[in-house]
Amino acid sequence: MSLLSLQQVRYAFPGWPPTVDGANLDVGEGAFHCLVGRSGCGKTTLLKLAAGLLAPDSGQVVFRSGRPGPRPGIGFVFQSPNLLEWLRVIDNVLLPVTLHGRPAPAQVRRAHELLAQLGLAAHARKYPRQLSGGQQSRVALARALVLQPALLLLDEPFAALDALTRLTMQRLVGELCRRHQPAVLLVTHDVEEAILLADRIVVLGNGRTELDVRVSGDAVRHRGDPEFLSLRSRLLDVLGVPAAA
């Protein structure tokens, strides 16, 4: 069953050609989708449409009940961690809860459990300025998961990280999503990242869905395997990148 469905969605910023122009996307419950494409192809706009942060000019965005506006049961991790510098780490994680009142003891326990799963248990009382960039990204991920969302939207959350931290975050995101089982839609420029993490990869080009391919089997998750290399070449070809790149 589709948890999220975008049907012939179109969106244009005032005075500009459409950023998203007839895109289709279906995300099933518990599925991990990656959305890849060149800069400016509409990936982040599509993610904001999925979240209800933007309303489409035409087409439909349906999240379960199809209610308009910011959608319940969605966690969003932006390109920047966007932590509040005057709040401690644990309070940043609990922010989505405190916006609606005092956190219940079970919610506080869940926040601490998420920090522990992300290797941040010892940092709960620190302030964001005392953390590295990778640690701040982990706090943002914990914050997005604290309300147990049915759908997790990730907008290139690893883009500003160094290569080694990025690999660590890829592993952590994969592990947390398997443990908590939200549906996931991750925007990335990194084709290899998409193959390693996703059940399904969607290529967006000129505001439209150009390819929607399933990723299956353990072999394809290893960079040196022929299946991995074949899928990588196929995706790069759709993106217009030479296969040797």
Image (cartoon, helix red, strand yellow):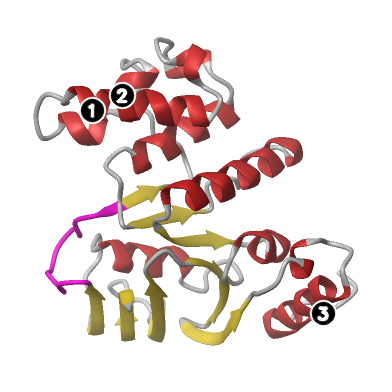
Q: From the viewer's perspective, is the residue at label 2 or at label 3 nearer?
A: 2
Q: Are marks 2 and 3 in contact (CB under 8 Å)?
A: no
Q: Position of residue 60 (x, y in %)?
A: 24, 83
Identity, as a three-letter code, of the amino acid under mark 3: Ser
The first of marks 2 and 3 along the sequence is 2
Helix, strand or loop status at disc 1:
helix
Question: Looking at the picture, does residue 85 appear above or below residue 68?
Answer: above
Total labels: the figure holds 3
Could you tell me which residue is drawn at 47 percent across and 68 percent down?
A: 43
Question: Looking at the picture, does residue 23 appear above or below residue 229?
Answer: below
- In this view, which residue lies farthest toward the left? 101
Does any portion of residue 56 appear in the rendered image? no
Numbered circle sitting on residue 219: none
Q: CA distance from mark 2 to mark 3?
A: 44 Å
Q: Are marks 2 and 1 in contact (CB under 8 Å)?
A: yes
Q: Would you name the residue on which mark 1 appears?
A: 106
Could you tell me which residue is drawn at 86 percent across and 69 percent down?
A: 245
Q: Is residue 52 left or right of residue 230?
A: left
Based on the picture, tell me whether residue 174 belongs to the magenta stretch.
no
Does any portion of residue 60 appear in the rendered image? yes
Helix, strand or loop status at disc 2:
helix
Numbered circle sitting on residue 109: 2
Could you tell me which residue is drawn at 48 percent across and 24 percent down?
A: 116
Q: Position of residue 130 (x, y in %)?
A: 51, 13
**Residue 165 vs residue 45, the one in the foreground:** 165
Question: Looking at the picture, does residue 195 appear above or below residue 56?
Answer: above
Identity, as a three-letter code, of the amino acid under mark 1: Ala
In the rendered image, which quarter contains the N terminus? bottom left
Q: Position of residue 105 (x, y in %)?
A: 20, 22
Q: Residues within 10 Å of mark 3 (few under 14, many from 20)?
A: few
Numbered circle sitting on residue 230: 3
Highlighted range, magenta: 64-74
